[in-house]
């Protein structure tokens, strides 16, 4: 019951955070087009600008997410979670105040800068928090429930956007983001893999408390920030982990293509507006929420996360618009079991960094393709060519997912090794 109470506060925080982000998703395309290309349904400049923002955001996430994940292993998940939840408020407040061209550019700059910290680290820290409180056996179901909470927030946010005017949409989103930050600071408990390893809390000043007459040692900066060598070493530590990272890369490549291209494709070809975007997102969100909250947590202990991962990727290959089963929870769960309890932040940060790398590459591939095949300069008539290429990237992720062979969790291996060592020592002493 105590674990449920603690995780309940986390789920409420995550729900409020993603509710705010999801509320603006259907409206942002119309706001962008109105600010940059008023009166038009096709605008290459908007496509390229969105792709550029995604690439810069991904570049920042590659650097920031592993650092934040690693810091959370030392200073606590709550302390680090405060940063993205607070920064996320700023760009929403700008558009809540005004959506003219000048304010849009101010939003664009602030969103790009804050997203470097917010986009990947929030999910990374939340997953590490769950891993701190759930055993290896129940982790897949717990990750699935958290994905379901995100999907439920997506549904509620999209539904709110469907019936709200554009101005109110951004005001509600800003209020939800503020509430998430305040709720987290008031109700969420700090979490660490080992409470005794907590360093000087980031958000509290004052001198360190001496123990046994000696001041505690300071964390070295070089140990705080993981290097590329550290990340490569982590990938090499487990074949299963590296395979999960590969799946994460190619699936994120496909998702990045959607983010940079899909909305503008629908706008240009079918003249979608905010409400129609919301209707489409609701269909996807409801299916995802039902599967992740009701069915998948029950199936995870029976079927296993590897098969669920393949099912989710296979569905994505058949129709890249359908996200009934989320890939993310099962990739994260598989990878989570390959590292120790004191490296969950680093592992989740590594996966988020790899996904961010795909987000950098994706706009350079799919934004030009989308703009080209929606224009009159297309080499042949196939407006949805970029969407087909996105499906191919997801197919590669599916193929890689079928090749993953899970191994016993690292913690179990460590326990067995320790038991074997203890038995051997006892035998020697008896002799």
Image: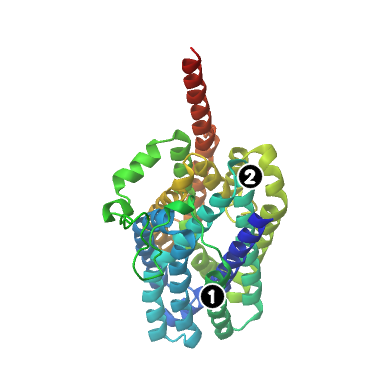
Dot 1: element: helix
Q: Nearer the viewer, residue 24 or 221?
A: 221
Q: Quadrant of the N terminus?
A: bottom right
Which residue is painted at 58% across and 69% down in the image? Answer: 187
Q: Nearer the viewer, residue 100 or 78?
A: 78
Residue 416 horizontal/vertical position (percent) = 53, 28
Residue 361 horizontal/vertical position (percent) = 37, 54
Which residue is painted at 51% across and 37% down in the image? Answer: 411
Lower sequence index among marks 2 and 1: 2
Q: Is residue 389 visible to the viewer in this orientation of the structure? A: yes
Say how the picture is coloured: rainbow
Residue 150 numbered mark, or none: none
Image position of 223 (left or right of 381): left
Residue 273 horizontal/vertical position (percent) = 58, 75
Dot 2: element: helix
Mark 2 crowdedness (10 Å alpha carbons): few <14, some 14-19, many ≥20? some
Determine which residue is flagged by label 1. 182
Which residue is painted at 56% across and 80% down in the image? Answer: 175
Q: Residue furthest top?
A: 431
Residue 148 horizontal/vertical position (percent) = 64, 57
Q: In the rendered picture of this protein, how many numbered marks are placed on residues? A: 2
Mark 1 crowdedness (10 Å alpha carbons): few <14, some 14-19, many ≥20? some
CA distance for labels 2 and 1: 29 Å
Q: Indicate whether 76 appears above or below 403.
A: below
Q: Residue furthest front?
A: 213
Q: Indicate whether 204 appears above or below 220.
A: below
Q: Are marks 2 and 1 in contact (CB under 8 Å)?
A: no
Q: Is residue 382 visible to the viewer in this orientation of the structure? A: no
Q: Nearer the viewer, residue 366 or 207?
A: 207
Determine which residue is flagged by label 2. 138
Image position of 420 (left or right of 284): left
């Amino acid at each position: 019951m105590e674990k449920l109470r603690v995780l309940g506060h986390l789920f409420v925080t995550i729900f409020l955070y993603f509710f705010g982000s999801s509320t603006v998703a259907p409206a942002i395309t119309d706001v962008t087009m109105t600010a940059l290309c008023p009166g038009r349904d096709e605008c290459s400049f908007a496509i390229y600008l969105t792709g550029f923002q995604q690439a810069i955001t991904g570049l920042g996430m590659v650097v920031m997410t592993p650092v934040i994940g690693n810091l959370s292993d030392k200073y606590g998940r709550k302390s680090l979670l405060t940063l993205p939840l607070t920064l996320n408020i700023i760009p929403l407040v700008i558009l809540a105040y005004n959506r003219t061209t000048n304010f849009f550019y101010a939003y664009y700059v602030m969103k790009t800068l804050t997203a470097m910290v917010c986009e990947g680290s929030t999910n990374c820290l939340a997953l590490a928090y769950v891993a701190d409180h759930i055993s290896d056996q129940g982790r897949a179901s717990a990750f699935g429930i958290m994905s379901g909470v995100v999907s439920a927030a997506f549904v509620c946010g999209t539904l709110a956007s469907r019936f709200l005017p554009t101005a109110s949409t951004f005001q509600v989103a800003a209020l939800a983001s503020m509430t998430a930050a305040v709720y987290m600071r008031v109700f969420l408990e700090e979490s660490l893999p080992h409470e005794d390893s907590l360093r000087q809390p980031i958000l509290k000043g004052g001198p360190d408390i001496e123990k046994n007459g000696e001041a505690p040692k300071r964390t070295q900066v070089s140990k705080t920030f993981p290097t590329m060598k550290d990340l490569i070493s982590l990938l090499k530590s487990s074949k299963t982990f590296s395979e999960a990272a590969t799946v994460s890369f190619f699936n994120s490549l496909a998702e990045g293509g959607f983010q940079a291209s899909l909305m503008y494709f629908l706008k240009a070809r079918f003249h979608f507006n905010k409400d129609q975007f919301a209707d489409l997102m609701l269909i996807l969100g409801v299916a995802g929420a039902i599967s992740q909250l009701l069915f998948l947590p029950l199936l995870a202990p029976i079927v296993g996360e590897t098969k669920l991962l393949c099912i989710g990727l296979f569905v994505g290959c058949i129709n890249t618009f359908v996200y009934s089963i989320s890939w993310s929870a099962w990739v994260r769960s598989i990878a989570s079991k390959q590292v120790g309890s004191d490296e969950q932040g680093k592992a989740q940060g590594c996966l988020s960094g790899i996904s961010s790398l795909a987000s950098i590459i994706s706009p350079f591939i799919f934004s030009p393709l989308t703009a080209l095949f929606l224009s009159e300069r297309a080499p042949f008539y196939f407006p949805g060519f970029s969407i087909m290429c996105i499906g191919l990237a997801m197919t590669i992720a599916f193929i890689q997912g079928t090749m993953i062979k899970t191994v016993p969790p690292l913690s179990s291996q460590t326990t067995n090794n320790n038991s074997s060592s203890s038995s051997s020592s006892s035998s020697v002493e008896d002799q």
